[in-house]
Each structure stands twice: as structure tokens, then as C-alpha cells.
Image: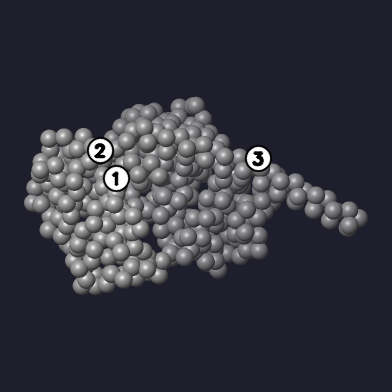
Amino acid sequence: MASIVLKDIVKKYGDGFPAVKGVSLEIADGEFMILVGPSGCGKSTLLRMIVGLEDITDGDLEIGGRRVNEKAPRDRNLAMVFQNYALYPHLTVFENIAFPLRLAKGTFSQDEVRRRVEAAADTLELREHLDRKPANLSGGQRQRVAMGRAIVRQADAFLFDEPLSNLDAKLRGQMRTEIARMQRRLGTTTVYVTHDQTEAMTLGDRVAVLRKGELQQVASPRGLYEQPVNLFVAGFIGSPPMNFVPGEVRDDVLHLPFADVPLDDRLRSVVGDRRLVIVGFRPEHVEDAALVEDGSRGVAFRADIDVTEWLGSELYAYIPFETNPEVAKKLEELDRELDGEGLRSQVVAVLSSESRVRDGDTAELWIDPARLLVFDPESSENLTRDEEAARRIDAETEEERRAALERAQRREAASGGAEDRERSASARGAA
């Protein structure tokens, strides 16, 4: 295992295009780091620079405390898992997994190769498929073979480049679990590139959000979700995404397109003398007023419901609104950066499945003003960000990561001891 440190990493191509602009990032030994962002943000380029498949234009890359800018990929002791699996169709699963060991000619005996391959196959539940060819495997099995090839190398770090994007939704869910379990068992430093919200929020110890080659924020998934630094991070993290509406300040009231929110001390202090702000709130923070037990601390409002979607565990309600032309351009630009479709302005509310709100209703809804985030329409800065709360969240997450790693390693040690005892018993029985 090893830490990975990026210091002001820059990547410019021959035509001068800056794909990565001065990214600095410290990835701790054993940490699971996610690189996330919309298409073209530079996340895959950054990963390829770490592994050595792209030259670094400027800056320093350190792996395990050693500068490796000029080192060839084979000398960095990193294992990469690609989006397209990169398996050899004419080789069996066993030989595909063993391939990096075979390349190191004379380094590993046949017994050592077999031991490592079988251990990786057991970790990924591939033992019964070792004699099969890739063409006879499912997409999930092929991806596990690619992961097995990474495991046998006993590399200092694993690098994943959107490894699950070719799988269907059910398989993605299963493979997420496999990757998380494998990383915890092995405790190997892992860098994982994705544009998928669910992968970013469920897999990573920390998530680095990139935008046009620049690092926007690095934090735990919860830290990004609750304390985003700006409009871009707030809009990118979360599914369904955060709602953004214009907020006009008049007479100590924050006027939203569908509700009037009296300014409390928190909102008054962050709004300052601004006349117009952008207000953000998560879809799940809107509730059906009829189901709120104590509505005294929040604001009730009536809204025309356009469409509803009942999903069993929850109900999505879509509320169209007219945006303020002064912030419309900013929100349209944000939508394009987030790979949106530029459709109508609407709020998404995720209500309880018990709600009786339906298409065409004028419903009474409720929201807690303490949940509202306020953004500067010029700088996009999150004016309501609580730095102390953000530090506390990340400290708690780091403590939880270390505890989870220790638990996984204790289980692995206990499991290994049980397997040794079982093999010894079998050997005595055979004798």
C-alpha cells in the first residue's frame, strides 16, 4: 500500500488545451478516493497521469513518498482496471488473472502463480470459472476477472476508470458491493473515476469533484452533500439533484417562486444587503404538509403539481415555476455544465409514499428554512456553508473509515485462520 500525493498537477496537450489545471490532492494510504465530475472535466486524464499513461506537463506526483513523474507505468507498481475490461479472449480466466505475474518472467514460481490466482479467485468468487474463456462469462464476471488481475499483482494502489459503466443497473449494484468489500478486505489505496452519483456517494471515503480541469472540493460524501462549497458541487452531488430557485429579498422576507420565507438570523446574516440570491434545497427536504407532525418551525406553502411519480417507497412531485431573468442565465449555464437537457424550470419534491398528492393537484407542502442553502448569484459561493460543521463531518468520516478498515482486516485474519485450520484437518484426514 502507499499514499498518492498530487502537487499542482497540470496537463496541457499539444494544441495548448489545459485538460487539468493545477490539481493538488493527498490520498492517504489505504484510502478509497473517488474522482467525479461531468464529461470532459479531466478526471480520466488525471487517473491516466497517476498510472503513467499520460505525461505530466507540470507539477509533482508522489507515490509512497517517491516522485514518479518520469517513471514508466510498469515501475509504479499500480494496478488499473479499465472500463472495457481489457481481457485476452484466447486465454482462460486463470491465465487472464495470472497475466501480470507471467510478465515478470522468472519472478514467480508456478506454485506461487497458482496460489495468488486462486486466492484472488476466492476473493471474487471466480474459482469455478477459472477454466472458462471471457466470451463465456457475463459482464459482471468479466469485470471481476479484471479486478482479479489487479489483485494478484499486490500493487501499491488500485486505479479504476469507470469500471461499471458497461453493466446494467442490477449488476452495477452488485459490483459496487464487491468492490467495496474487496477494498476493505485488502486495505489497498484506491482511486476510482466515475460520473455515476450512486457510485460516488456509496463507495468513496472521500470524493474529489472536478469541473473543467479544476478541483472544486474534496470531502466525504456526506460533507459534499450537506456542506457544498459552491453552486456547481451542490448541483452535481445528489440524485435527484438539488433544486435551485431565485430568491428575492424584500421587507425582511425571502420571496421564492412558490413560497415566502421570513428571514431568521441565519438567513439574514448570509444574505446581507443582497437583493437577489439563488436558493438551493434537496428534493427530500420538501414534505407533504398533511404528514408533518410539527409544522411550527417550518413554512407551509401551496404549489401546483404538474406530474407525480409513485415509486413504492417514495413519491416524486414535479412543480413548474417561473424563474427570475436575472439568474436564469446562471442556472442555464449550470445546467449545461452538469450535462442537463435544458428543459423547463421545475422543482422536484421527494415526498413520503403515503402522500395523496397527485397530478394536477394544488397541494399544501412544507419546508424547513434551516434546510435552505443560499448562493451568491455572481460568485456561485455557498453563503450558508458552515466550515466548523464541514470539518466535523469529515473528521467523523475519517474515524469511521479507520474503524471499518480495522474491522475488515480482523475479519480477514480470523477467516484466514479458520481456513488454515480447515486445510490442516483435511490433510490429517487424508493421511
Look at 40% across and 45% down and name the residue there.
221
**Residue pointed to by mark 2:** 266
- Image quadrant in which the C terminus is located: bottom right
Answer with mark 1 or mark 2, whichever residue precedes in sequence.
Answer: 2
**Residue pointed to by mark 3:** 107
- Between 420 and 401, the one lying in front of the other is 401
The disc placed on residue 430 is: none
As drawn, the residue found furthest toward the left would be 325
Name above or below for residue 341 compared with residue 209. Answer: below
The disc placed on residue 370 is: 1
The spot of residue 191 in percent (x, y) is 45, 43
Look at 17% across and 57% down and name the residue there.
258
Q: Residues within 10 Å of mark 2 (few under 14, many from 20)?
A: few
- Marks 1 and 3: which is nearer the front? 1
Look at 28% across and 35% down and name the residue there.
21
Is residue 365 in view?
A: yes
